[in-house]
Image (cartoon, rainbow, N blue to C red):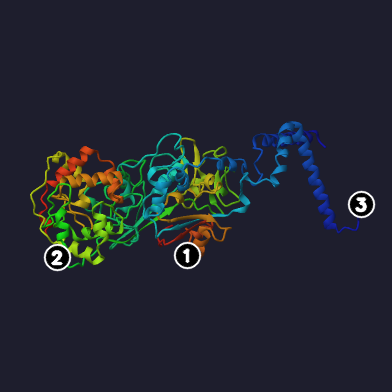
């Protein structure tokens, strides 16, 4: 503290920072002494990352901001998306494990609440013939239907995801380009995230003992392809694209429609935007 | 400093060093690189191989199919929706061609509350009486385009000039020869369409092409009206060319357009009940060989053997053309 011209607060700050440095240095030396090899290699991996594109040589995640759109007025409930997602991502073949699904809302005459079913409803499983095939049974064919529609659902890839917040081991995270992913190597299968998600979008893979979820087909979008569910949708009810590109399908979708998100009050700030859903859809 | 405090401090320092070393040892190198997660897991996930390819991938080999598909109303339905994911194809073998199309097509086209009105939907039971959809619809070009045209010709004017046709098609539109078709009682809309096709060159025949080219559009309408109004009652032709019973079983695939007994429900399609058997055989073979061009018939005839064709001809030639005498 030889420099007396400094105000007392600066002097204190300098002292504290020196103390911090000293502590870090001592710790580093101690760590190096204990595990010199590990320390060295970890320092090495820091340097080249700044210039290279991540996560792949052809794809830089800082240049994209993905988002998803669902036009429920177009959905015909064919469930090709559900089947394609399972095939693309190797999700278990039974009806009760799925990363995306479609809900059918039916308001019958004289009823005030919607009847909701999805492909894993026993009636629909029976109609499809097996748990590995997906079909909506025509169960309201002869009923007096006042209003009915289908709503595709999937992970909302929230900006402030509750599932990431609760993960105790850092196994789930949000990427720079706006996709919430799971590191299956780190997941300990505690299922906090499954419970934390307000949308019920996560599932548990009992075979591997890890949580699982929609990745927006991260392996496809990083190669310039569409997610599998978007690729197979025959009516264009699912829209995907880069919000950074003002002419991308999703930018146009959000700009040209009045969109809404599910459960905005939860504070998760979803990135799946809906058109044509009703008050009971959450 | 008292000894026991020094010991305690040393113990705490040792614990801190040990803890820090353990953290370094157990934490992946890339953890904290971009955030509190293992950065290496991102390229791991991104490196997974896509299972679904794109129609562009299919186009590489199936250019002709791709061209037909992409020009028609099913172009929003990607190849892999019906044929399955293309990863490993063609290396690991063929992709399936759906056989139970009634089941597949009804996934999207079964009339169901909740489907938007813009989606083409049918009551499956009434629409096809259990037949496979591809009997009538080409999945790559599903719309049936041969819509009936209104025939507004003058039958009397047609009758006056019909003498020129009678040497082959008979005085009353009943052909004297097994290889030439009867015209009497045929749907006028079909007659006008097919005569128009000879005239335009869309369909070719050594005899018919020059004759049709000399006709005006009004003539075509007049002839269609005249022959469509005649009675088709005629002695059945030689039905001995095939097995009518076997033909009846095969004919299940024809009924949706040509009617159960060969009386077509839609005037755009020809009635074939009581038609000349040899003519039916020739026509089917021409469709099969691609000499007569019709997207529907080409698909249907492709799978028929010579024996099948004879059996079908025998069956339809033996049917009563009765109700078509309108």
The disc at residue B206 is none
In depth, the one of A34 and A173 nearer the eye is: A173
Along the horizontal axis of the image, is B140 left or right of A228?
Answer: left
Q: Earlier in the sequence, mark 1 or mark 3?
A: 3
Q: What SS does tag 1 mark?
A: loop
Secondary element under disc 2, as helix, strand or loop, is: helix
Residue in the foreground of this view, choosing between B230 and A203: B230
Discs 3/2, front: 2
Badge 3: few (under 14), some or many (20 or more) residues near its Cα, within 10 Å?
Answer: few
Whole-percent x and y of residue B77? 40, 51
Instruction: Please identify the quarter of the rendering in which residue B39 is found.
Output: top right
Chain of the residue under the numbered disc 1 shown in the image: A
Labelled pair 1, 3 in contact (Cβ < 8 Å) = no
User: Circle 3 marks a residue in which chain?
Assistant: A
**Separation (CA) of disc 3 from disc 2:** 126 Å
* Residue B247, x across and y down, in percent: 17, 41
Please rate how many residues cluster around mark 2, counting C-alpha atoms within 10 Å: few if below 14, some from 14 to 19, many from 20: few
Residue B187 on image: x %, y %: 18, 58
Foreground label between 1 and 3 = 1
- Give the residue at mark 2: B160
Q: Nearer the viewer, residue A60 or A38?
A: A60
Residue at image mark 1: A257
Query: Quadrant of residue A32 in the image?
Result: top right
Residue B251, x across and y down, in percent: 19, 45
């Amino acid at each position: 503290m030889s420099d007396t011209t400094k105000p007392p607060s600066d002097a204190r700050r300098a002292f504290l920072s020196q103390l911090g440095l000293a502590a870090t240095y001592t710790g580093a030396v101690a760590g190096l002494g204990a595990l010199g090899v590990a320390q060295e290699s970890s320092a090495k991996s820091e340097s080249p990352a700044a210039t290279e594109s991540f996560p792949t040589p052809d794809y830089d995640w800082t240049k994209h901001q993905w988002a998803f759109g669902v036009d429920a007025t177009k959905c015909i409930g064919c469930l090709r998306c559900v089947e394609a997602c399972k095939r693309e991502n190797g999700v278990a073949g039974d009806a009760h494990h799925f990363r995306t699904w479609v809900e059918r809302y039916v308001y019958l005459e004289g009823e005030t609440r919607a009847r909701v079913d999805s492909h894993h409803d026993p009636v629909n499983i029976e109609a499809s013939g097996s748990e590995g095939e997906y079909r909506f049974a025509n169960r309201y064919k002869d009923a007096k239907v006042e209003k009915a529609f289908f709503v595709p659902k999937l992970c909302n890839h929230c900006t402030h995801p509750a599932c990431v917040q609760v993960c105790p081991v850092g196994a789930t995270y949000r990427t720079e380009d706006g996709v919430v992913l799971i590191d299956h190597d780190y997941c300990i299968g505690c299922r906090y995230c499954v419970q934390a998600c307000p949308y019920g979008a996560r599932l548990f893979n009992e075979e591997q003992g890890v949580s699982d979820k929609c990745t927006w087909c991260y392996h496809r979008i990083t190669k310039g392809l569409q997610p599998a569910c978007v690729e197979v949708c025959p009516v264009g009810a699912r829209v995907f694209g880069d919000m950074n590109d003002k002419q991308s399908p999703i930018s146009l979708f959000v700009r040209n429609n009045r969109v809404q998100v599910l459960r905005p009050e939860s504070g998760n700030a979803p990135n799946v935007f809906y058109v044509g859903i009703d008050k009971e859809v959450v | 400093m008292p000894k026991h405090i020094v010991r305690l401090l040393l113990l705490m320092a040792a614990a801190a060093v040990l803890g820090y070393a353990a953290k370094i040892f157990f934490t992946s190198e890339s953890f904290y690189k971009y955030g509190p997660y293992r950065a290496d897991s991102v390229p791991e996930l991104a490196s997974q191989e896509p299972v679904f390819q794109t129609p562009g991938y299919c186009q590489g080999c199936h250019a002709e199919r791709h061209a037909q598909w992409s020009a028609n109303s099913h172009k929003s339905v990607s190849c892999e929706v019906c044929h399955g994911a293309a990863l490993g194809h063609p290396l690991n073998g063929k992709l399936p061609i759906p056989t139970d199309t009634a089941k597949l097509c009804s996934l999207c086209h079964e009339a169901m509350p909740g489907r938007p009105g813009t989606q083409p939907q049918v009551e499956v039971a009434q629409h096809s009486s259990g037949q496979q959809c591809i009997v009538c619809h080409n999945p790559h070009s599903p719309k049936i385009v041969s819509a009936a045209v209104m025939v507004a010709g003058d039958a009397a004017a047609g009758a006056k000039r019909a003498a020129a046709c009678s040497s082959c098609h008979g005085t009353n539109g009943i052909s004297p020869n097994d290889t030439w078709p009867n015209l009497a009682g045929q749907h006028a809309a079909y007659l006008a369409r097919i005569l128009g096709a000879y005239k335009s060159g869309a369909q070719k025949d050594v005899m018919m092409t020059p004759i049709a080219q000399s006709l005006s559009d009004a003539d075509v309408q007049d002839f269609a009206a005249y022959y469509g109004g005649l009675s088709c009652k005629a002695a059945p032709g030689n039905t001995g060319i095939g097995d009518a019973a076997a033909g009846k079983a095969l004919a299940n695939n024809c009924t949706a357009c040509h009617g159960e007994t060969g009386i077509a429900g839609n005037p755009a399609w020809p009635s074939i009940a009581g038609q000349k058997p040899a003519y039916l055989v020739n026509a089917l073979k021409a469709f099969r060989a691609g000499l007569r061009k019709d997207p529907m018939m080409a698909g249907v005839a492709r799978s028929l053997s010579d024996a099948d064709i004879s059996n079908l001809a025998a069956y339809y030639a033996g049917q009563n053309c009765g109700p078509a005498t309108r």
